Image (spheres, helix red, strand yellow):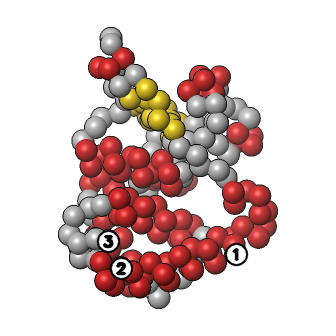
Amino acid sequence: MCAALAKPVLYTYFRSSCTWRVRIALALKGIAYDSAPVNLVKDGGQQLTPEFQAVNPMQQVPALKIDGITLSQSNLTVLEQFGEKKQEWAKNCISRGFKALEQILRETAGRYCVGDEVTMADLCLVPQVFNAGRFKVDLTPFPTINRINKALLELEAFQTSHPSRQPDTPSELRA
């Protein structure tokens, strides 16, 4: 089969926010793809296959093989460097960002972040709200963010791309 006709392959990690954004975009565009899970956490990432290392020498997800080319994104595991302080650091960063975003969204939001059509901002918002939940950020001060997130999670593209529904999601984290 010609590379241009081959089904795209998305190298993914179920919890990767960057990969989630790509899954949402593919779902919105109706592009079917094969998922190739890459566990970035197990054994400190030491189990990465030679196949994936050849696809993306940076050994980061997402990487998307489509139409004979590979597109990759840096997704550094910055939080890993902070050890036990990562929870508090993440909470502070997310809260600070959401405080500013809440003010912006009061001016730009319709049903979604910018009016009533899904935009790139929405693809970024939902994974970050998910991360806020993981790091136990209090979302009550952000009613606009909560409302938009709820509306977006009603869309099939956001549901099918959710981390809890990925092939590599551990059974205890499946929804």
Kindly tell me whether residue 120 is visible in this rendering: yes
Horizontal arrangement in the rendering, residue 109 relative to residue 166 (left or right): left
* Image x and y of residue 21, in percent: 42, 52
Report the residue that reaches farthest toward the left. Answer: 116
The residue lying at 35 percent from left, 64 percent from top is 122
Are the residues flagged by discs 3 and 2 in contact, CB closer than 8 Å? yes
Cα separation between marks 2 and 1: 25 Å
The residue lying at 31 percent from left, 83 percent from top is 107
Horizontal arrangement in the rendering, residue 58 relative to residue 20 (left or right): right
| Quarter that holds the C terminus | bottom left
Q: Identify the amino acid type marked 1.
A: Glu
Q: Which mark is residue 9?
A: none
Are the residues flagged by discs 3 and 1 in contact, CB closer than 8 Å? no
The residue lying at 70 percent from left, 75 percent from top is 88
* Crowding at mark 2 (Cα within 10 Å: few <14, some 14-19, many 20+): some
Q: Identify the amino acid type marked 2.
A: Leu
Report the residue that reaches farthest toward the top. Answer: 1
What residue does disc 1 label? 88
Q: Earlier in the sequence, mark 2 or mark 1?
A: 1
71 or 61: which is nearer to us?
71
User: Tag 2, which secondary structure?
Assistant: helix
User: Tag 3, which secondary structure?
Assistant: loop
What residue does disc 3 label? 113
Q: Identify the amino acid type marked 3.
A: Cys
What residue does disc 2 label? 105
User: Tag 1, which secondary structure?
Assistant: helix
Horizontal arrangement in the rendering, residue 122 relative to residue 49 (left or right): left
The image quarter in which residue 138 lies? bottom right
Please name which of the two marks, 3 or 1, marks the residue nearer to the observer: 3
The residue lying at 70 percent from left, 32 percent from top is 47
